[in-house]
Image (tube, rainbow, N blue to C red):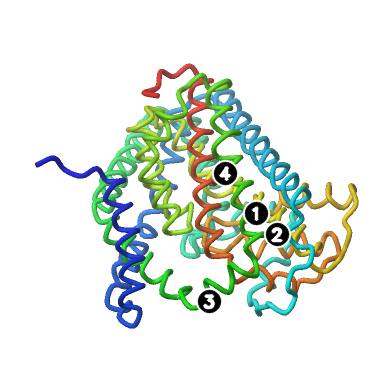
Amino acid sequence: MKKIQLHWQILIAIILGALYALLFTNYVEYVSWMGDLFLRSLRMVIIPLILSSIISGVTNIGEAKNLGRLGLKTMLYYLTTSLFAIVTGLFFVNLIKPGVGADLGFNKNIEGLSAAKDSFGETLLNIIPTNLFESLSNGQMLPIIFFSIIFGFFITRADEKSKVFLTDFFNSVFEVMMKLTMFIIKITPFGIFGIVAVTVADNINSLGEVIGRLGTYMLVVLIALAVHAIFTLPMMLKFIGKVNPLKHFKALRTPLLTAFSTSSSSATLPLTMEAVENGSGVSNKVTSFTLPLGATINMDGTALYECVAAMFIAQAYGVALGPIEQVIVVLTALLASIGAAGIPMAGLVMISIILTAVGLPLEGVGLILAVDRILDMCRTMVNVWSDSCGAVIIAKSEGETLNV
């Protein structure tokens, strides 16, 4: 009997999880442990995987000029696609105007907005860890990535004996972490079943009312995300990367479905790295550098969502944002998306930065809180898709021969 492919298993798990929540709403706690176990397993491997993959990748890149060239290409891609995403969102929110006539009574309280008080300058400063072990224990991605790049670079500057030993050591650690990741991938359908069941059960009662009141806003976000994911990124793959977008999409089905279910690009990172390397054929040298960085700072979907949300709140409160204010929204959304960690609902916290920048009330976040989880699932999928497209385009520019 032919084995069902993993992406089909995950799709079936999503459908069964939703059905279970609809039929057995009061018994969801009996399956929620599967989702918790899966997410804990993924989070267990994220930090050692990022640390070993980046150090391994940087040491394999070799010379400083090679690292600089790869870093420049990576940052240029991330900034370009994020800007494209934000402009797409801005176009549709101005065209459809979902906030005009919105129900301001449909408001929810939100906690944790104080987390967004850090300025962009402070975010940049915090990239340099004062205590690496504290960053590791708290899962602070940017300091970990910064240290890994610096450490990997100086391994290439060490004497031959130390260089060979450390390079072999981190290559071996990375290989073991990928084996462990492959083992965790086998339980993915069960984890997704538990996560979807809990998510549907939590939102089942308010779903109809929410869609009725915020349906147009949701539609604008989803249309803009679809345009960016289905047209902009595949066009870049086709004309810049000279690869087949459909083949690359087929290789990415498992991580994309996992991103949709977990709403976390960081939790999906192990699966994304496996798919891009083994499916699309990108070398470890490129994936180990671009994908961990992308999971942390390349947030196309989040940047687009933040822009649309800020404009929606302005429209709902009757505040007319002129061209200059809209440029501020675009630039702030770009910077805020870089500061948004790859965790669920981080973008919701980061949006307060944009609201503050253009003088909008922070309470406006409560207007969109009810539908954030649904939109979070969709924008995370776009974030992961963009990261993977970047890895393929950069690998192609480095002269690699790919499977796609």
Q: Amino acid at mark 1?
A: Tyr
Choose the circle earlier in sequence order: 3 or 4: 3
Q: Secondary structure at mark 4?
A: helix
**Circles 3 and 2: CB atoms closer than 8 Å:** no
Choose the circle earlier in sequence order: 4 or 2: 4
Q: Secondary structure at mark 3?
A: loop
Specify the quadrant of the image occupied by residue 386.
top right
Q: Residue 226: which disc?
A: 4
Residue closest to the eye, 365 or 74: 365
Residue closest to the eye, 328 or 128: 328
**Circles 3 and 4: CB atoms closer than 8 Å:** no
Residue at position x 39%, y 59% in the image: 43
Task: Name, please, the residue furthest toward the bottom.
Answer: 26
Residue closest to the eye, 1 or 178: 1
Dot 2 alpha-carbon crowd within 10 angstroms: few under 14, some 14 to 19, many 20 or more: many
Q: In the rendering, at what x and y percent does residue 140 appear?
A: 54, 58
Mark 1 sits on what residue?
A: 305
Mark 3 sits on what residue?
A: 206
Choose the circle earlier in sequence order: 1 or 4: 4
Can you tell which of label 1 and label 4 is closer to the viewer? 4
**Circles 2 and 1: CB atoms closer than 8 Å:** yes
Residue at position x 68%, y 56% in the image: 306
Can you tell which of label 4 and label 2 is closer to the viewer? 4
Give the distance between the C-alpha atoms of the residues marked 1 and 4, in whole angstroms. 12 Å
Mark 2 sits on what residue?
A: 309
Which quadrant of the rendered structure holds the N terminus? top left
